[in-house]
Structure formats: C-alpha cells, structure tokens
Image (tube, rainbow, N blue to C red):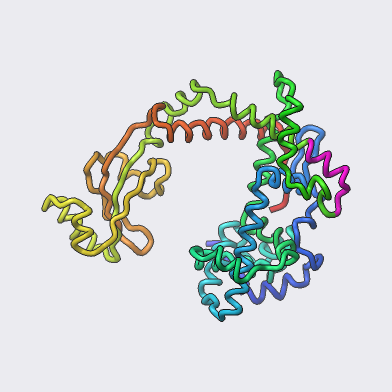
Amino acid sequence: DRRVRDPAATHDELTSATRLHTLCDRHSVETLYGKVVFSAGSEDYCWEDVQLAAELRGDWARVRDRLRQGLACLRASDEREEGLEEAEIDSAAEEFRYSRDLVSAQEMEEWLARWNITAEDWMDYVRWSLLRQKWAGELDDLVSEYPPEEDHVDRHLGIEAVCSGDLDRFATALADRVAVSGREGSPELDPAEVSEVLRRFPAHLAERGLAGISLEACRAKMERLARLEVSFRRFREEGATPRRIAALIRSRRIDWTRLVLTSVSFPEDQMAREAALCVREDGMNLGEVAADVRRELTRSTMYIEDMDANVRDSFLGAQKGELVGPIESGEDFVLYQVLDKTSPSSDDEALSARAREAVLRLQLDREINDRVKWARPG
C-alpha cells in the first residue's frame, strides 16, 4: 500500500514546507498566462485562451459566482464563530489529495508549486468547499449578508478554478473545439454567425481585454475562439446522425437498460434481512415495509451503466417487481425493488440524448488523439 510506504505529512507540515515555494503574492489564473496548454499543428493554445473560451460559454462567470459563495461562507464562519471540525477538514483534504494521486508531501508540494498556489490557499479552498456544502440551502442569503470584496474574489479565482478541476475541464472543452475545426471538406464559416458569437463575450473583455495582455492580442484570440465555437456548433449538428445513434444504442443494450427502483436503507444487516422477508415471504411491497419501520422510501431511475460495479451484476437478471438485496452501501444496508426494467430504444428521448453525447464524445476523443498535443501541468 503506497500510503504505508510513503506516508503523507500533516497539513501543518505541508503548509510550512510549501510556504518557501511561493512564487508571488497574487495567486490568480493570470500567473498562468503565456504558458502553453496544448498545441494543434502550428497553433499553440495557452491558459488565457482557456479562460477566454470559458468566458464565452458563461462557465467562467459560474466559477466566479461559486467562489463568491465560498468566500461568503468563510466570512460567515468567522463572524458567527461556527467553524468546521478539524476531522472534517482533514478528511476532505485527504480525499482531495488521494483523488489526484498526491499521496506524499513532496507530490503535493510539487503540484501546488506548478499551479502557483500556497498550501494556505489550498486549505482555504478545502474549507470554503465544505462550508458551501454545509450551508447549501442559504448561499444566496450568505452572499447578501457577507459579500466578499471583488479584489478578494479576483485573487482567489484561480485557486477555485484549479482546485475544483474546472480549469482542466475548460482546457478539455477548448481542445474539443480545436480538434474538430478546419477539418478537410469543412464548409466556410458564415461571418455573420462568427460575429454573433463574438458578441457573446462579456463587454469588459471587448473593452479592456485581459490584464497583462494587449487589447489587440486579446481581441485576436477572441476572434479565433468565436470561429472555433461556430465550427463546433456545426460538428454537433452534423456529427451524431440517427444511424450512428441507433448503432450505438444497439451495441450498449445491457449498459443502457433502464431501471426504475424504490429503495430503503437500514443501519444493520439483520434489520434489512427481516424487511426483505416481509416482502418475499409475506407479500408486502417495499413501501409498506418502509412505512411500518419508519424508514424513508426513495425512488430513482438509472441505467445499468451508472451503477457501482460491485452491485451491477445483482440487477442484470432482476425482473420487474423483484426485490434485490440487502446490498451493503457505506455504513448502510439497502433493499431495492424493481418497479420497471426497460431495454434501450431509439424511441426513448432521454436515452437518444445520452447516445448522441456518447457518439460525439467518441468522435471528439478520436480527433483530439490525432490532432492535439498536451503540454499542461497537473
């Protein structure tokens, strides 16, 4: 076990060590400008291109709004003196690191240095992410009551974008657009359509551009990104034909079998087994059993593909009306009743939409593998 061979330092030790690696006081995405993320042919695409493309789609504004919520939560926590338990913070920090394979202190330090983020700022991200979850139902009120200063938002925007994984996702979204642009046989783009997309950039970018980049260079990048977006629109319209969608659905008949389920969770295996006997032997349905023992009955719809690998086999042969379980899930034991089981069909609008996205994703991955050369850190 790698954790045993190479134990991670405590977060205090990590903070002390990485403080020496801080490159500057401003931990914004601006510190990444000019660094190449990927190349396609003779064209390089840098982190400012990734940000501008996210601005065009409206994704950057959503990151900013989410960060404002997180910073408001931090301020509320300080003023209300309603903090988080250290165990909660440690658990979330550990989950962050292991999910990114940053097991040792050295690996974590190197990751932080690559992105020019301090350990203190990373731990702030962990805290405001936890608080956002904890106070999810009152975020709008918190932003109104504890509004963060906009320069504070600016300083932490890169931290939110990097640590959340959004910046990497935005880079992939840009690579998607680059990979399918200018393909052989592609028709000329309509200038009017390009102009319409260009107008969707936030007004402040058209007027001032990005800090540290000339307005002329920024506008040229925006023009290029608008053309990529128009080209990508065409790809989405033309790439997933009905024939391709139907063929993929036929090939995924098992994975895309849809189940409508009710479920009840129990804290003990024996309780779940007794409840199962009431259904199997006494003829009760799961809803009646849940009401008798005062447990919540949950209804859900899912595809076989989306189930955890350790429970998938239990549902492959299950028929309509059948009880499945108890199945261990975390600290609970869950009973499921199959209300409906439907084989995939092109007539299913939700499944057709899913298949359409899968067809496009397969094509995009192929184009990216052929045309894009990655150079990004992380």
The furthest residue to the left: 282
In x, y percent, where is residue 330?
38, 61
In x, y percent, where is residue 218?
83, 44
Majority secondary structure in the magenta region = helix
Is 48 magenta? The answer is: no
Question: Image height check: is 359 above or below 168?
Answer: above
Residue at 71 percent of width and 68 percent of height: 149
**From the viewer's perspective, is 169 left or right of 242?**
right
Query: Which image quadrant for residue 224?
Result: top right
Query: Which image quadrant for residue 317?
Result: top left
Q: Nearer the viewer, residue 126 or 192?
A: 192
Count how many numbered circles sit on residues in the image. Answer: 0
Residue range in magenta is 212-223
Residue 187 visible somewhere in the drawing: yes
In x, y percent, where is residue 342?
32, 34
In x, y percent, where is residue 95?
54, 63
Residue at 43 percent of width and 28 percent of height: 249
Residue 126 visible somewhere in the drawing: no
Residue at 45 percent of width and 24 percent of height: 246
Is 220 magenta? The answer is: yes
